[in-house]
Amino acid sequence: MESNRKLKMAIAFASVAALSVFFSLHYRRRRKQRSRRCACYLRADSKPQDSFRRVLADNSYSPFKHLKLEDGDSSYSHPYEAEITALLDCPQLEFTFYPDEKIPTTRDTYTWVETEQQLNELADILIKERVFAVDTEQHSLRSFLGFTALMQISTQDEDYLIDTIKLHDAMGILRPVFSETSICKVFHGADNDVLWLQRDFHIYVVNLFDTAKACDILSKPQRSLAYLLETYCGITTNKLLQREDWRQRPLPQDMVQYARTDACYLLYVARCLVGELKQKENESCFDDELHFVLEACRRSNMICFQRYMKDIEAAPGESAASSIISRHLNGQGGESDDFKAQFQDMVRRLCSWRELMARVHDESLRFVLSDQAIVALASKVPTTTTDIFDTIRQADFNTDSLSSSMPSPSPVVYSHMDGFCDLLQERIDNCNEISLVVLQKCLGQDGTCPLSVFNYSVLVNFTMRSTNKVVSRQNGTKSLKQVSRKASRELFVKKFSCKSPVYHNCRIYANDGRLLCYCDRRKLEWYLHRGLAKLVEDDPPAVMLLFEPKGRPEDEDNEFYIQRKKNICVGCGEGNHYLRYRIIPSCYRMHFPEHLKSHRSHDIVLLCVDCHEVAHAAAEKYKGKIAEEFGIPLFVRNIVDLRDDHVASEPCAMGINFEQAGISPLELRTAAMALIRHGQRMPQKRREELTQIVMRFYGGRDISNADLERALLVGMSSHERRRLEKKRGLSLKHSNGGIIPDKRQIGSTKKMMISSTVNRSKVETVDVSFSEEEQQYVNEEITDQVETEPINPGMEPEAPAHDNNNENTICYTSQNGNLQNEGLDLGDSRNDETQPTHNPKLSLLGHGPHGKQVVDHILKEYGEDGIGVFCQRWRQVFVEAINPRFLPAGWDIKHSGRRDFGEFSVYNPIKKALAEAAKS
Ligand code: AMP
Ligand code: MN
Ligand code: ZN
């Protein structure tokens, strides 16, 4: 008996071993074959959209972010809601659409707009108009979400064709014209155009007259533009051109003509239609309630209320799969249930694969793989490459319209054949896995596909959503983490490394010819512009001051300011990419007295991404030490049970672990916000977890809905509070009871919460177990950080504001998926400092309350000398962390940071006092 069992086990063992050897050999051989074949077609095939630097609607699963106006509400509402609402009651139409009774004749010339300067000139022209006509042409075949390839604008005098591909990143120039209430924009069938303009350019149309809406009211037999052109202008158009490839450049002559025709008669047509509407008004004397013109305007402006949204579905390709399945299986009765099940399963996988590939490669679904090809593949399930190709080709050939213009199979299928075979042969067994494998293969460590602005967020986004769902089924999770890490590093380098050399190495000489300092161009220009200096050399430029500077660098015996600075990482010497690093964390520095913030070029150095990460991690760790030493926790906690309207956040009592006590203000706010907004809809478990987070702030006691509201206020600026007040009515609607789980439920999850206590020295907001909707909310909150406005408006001492938003704030996911954030400096020689009020969120991520309390404490106990010592400690931390070998000569841990103010410096106390006086 016993030996029999042993034998059985031995056999079982042996066969498992043999199988695994077999599979690993098999797999290795396949891998070899693959690596020879794999080269993504995109490496050779460049697309016009590759040149876009700013893509508002990327291919990720995160929701579209709308334009945020400075004083506006969140990105959840329409930025011009108020203006549009006002127009609904009171349309602005006291002008003539077209000056002439006669049908316009085609003008000889048109203006092709393709440079930023031309676009600016056009904006200047349009802002003076009372009305103009607009149309756009889209490209959707070789793009996942589509993009605007051309915009036609016609005024009463002139036709403009705007190359919206070349000017993609500059189109915002037209934003004010389109949102200007007093200028009427005439479209025909604006429904799509309005959304496309939001999607690509954050352009919002306000004051619209849609000739199609006028047709509806007049009960015209047809509402197409072709019909109107024929009826009113006697012109026939070839609508087939509508579906041409509008990316072509130069645009063929017939397409230019077609595009112009779509816009240039619109003003005249509008005039005719308004005439008829007015006439109808007069005729219908029985019913003076009907104002036909007004109604046309009202319906038109209702279109403007639309907001662009991405379609976001639960699983990739799910809706397409359902529609294919229902279309196909409907007419077919004879198939067996087995066949049907297999067919459906195969359609789902193919759709899932197709959608991910389309996102990654920025192609339309139909370009990647047609619906009919999916049906054919799912019915036949071919196994060899040749069979697969033939099946696709045959299916496409049978449907006439596609076969002529598109390669079949598409280059996407063709160059990613191995993944495709795995899919068909069911080596990958569920949809989640398909996604992981696809992303791994395409964008992973040895991924085949180029990482572009269109697909990196797919990766980061998707990884966050799925890592927790597919809990380490294989080694999948681990490698995916690596994928995501690699991607976020690349993303980081791309987004945040300085685009051009930081140090321009321009020189400033004193009037006696002695070198004062090196600086950037803008600083030179500042002096030149004000006649305070004259140019003495051109390349690299140098100026001589025309006034006597206060103090010379030599006086301070410091060569730091009078040497060329190299554009390399001061840590390792890397010269290809680098970004600015603040040695003294801004959560402290922002609270220093103004005169101690100067000389900031000393404490801002260039680091490559790797050194940046190391230095940052060390600084974060040291913040924990500071927290302990000063008894000021990094995070807030409300230990006093306050039932009044005032929220007081106090440091935790002494003697507890300062990293774990309390809670990050951002985490608190995010949890409270999620509970208020989505509390009722989220899964109970998640709701309890979030409730626990908020409870931690209240010292563990039970919380009420009012407590949630109060938690929102923690760390908010007064401006933000006002905004919240305004929104309050809205959010309260969702919060009617039922959010807070009862005590018993909380009790059941308590243990889990304690054991999952995380290291709070980093802000853990990217909680992968968030519900989807909540995740979207959090994502938005986080990506906000990336797109924050320039941080130092208005207090520019010596140079104009920078326009390079991306360099202001870093926000990246590092190894642990932690979010890290440091304010970045803008120029190498400016002396201003980020103010907490400009970006309240910065303080949420960057330990704002802690920073202020520490600085206040130092100033109170040790005065300004204390700040000096404090800075030295941070420089020490920096030096120990990365052992910098390329610091400029003269850089010194003991640097004083003091300086006197010159006559022309905005920091000059007299000048400041004068400025203050002038203000009040
Ligand atoms: P239009 O409003 O006629 O100028 O059309 C604007 C854009 O919509 C065109 O450039 C096409 O990309 C797209 N479009 C409109 N109608 C169709 C259609 N029937 N088929 C394909 N694309 C269309
Ligand atoms: Mn058109
Ligand atoms: Zn590829």
Image (spheres, rainbow, N blue to C red):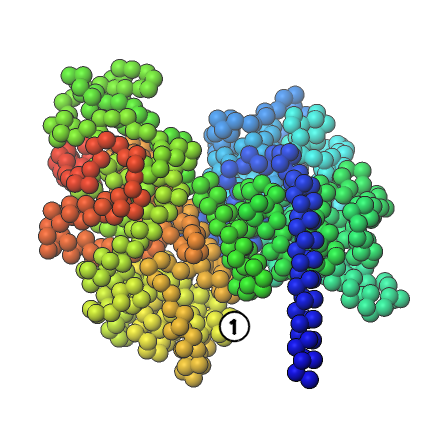
Question: At 15% from the left edge and 54% from the top edge, which residue is drawn?
Answer: 858
Would residue 750 be visible to someone looking at this image?
yes
The N terminus lies in quadrant: bottom right
**Residue closest to the eye, 348 or 814:** 814
Does residue 210 lie above or below 318 as drawn?
above
- From the image, tell me which residue sits under label 1: 683
Expressed as whole percent of the image width and height from the top left, the position of residue 495 reads 45, 41
Q: Is residue 678 left or right of residue 414?
A: left
Tag 1 secondary structure? loop
* Dot 1 alpha-carbon crowd within 10 angstroms: few under 14, some 14 to 19, many 20 or more: few
Does residue 430 lie above or below 684 as drawn?
above
The C terminus lies in quadrant: top left
Query: Looking at numbered disc 1 in the image, what kind of residue is underneath it?
Result: Pro
Q: Is residue 694 left or right of residue 829?
A: right
Question: At 42% from the left edge and 41% from the top edge, which residue is drawn?
Answer: 496
Would residue 179 be visible to someone looking at this image?
no
**In the rendered image, which quarter is residue 722 located in?**
bottom left
Point out the residue furthest to the front here.
Answer: 3
**Residue closest to the eye, 897 or 195:** 897
Expressed as whole percent of the image width and height from the top left, the position of residue 476 reads 57, 58
Expressed as whole percent of the image width and height from the top left, the position of residue 217 reads 67, 50
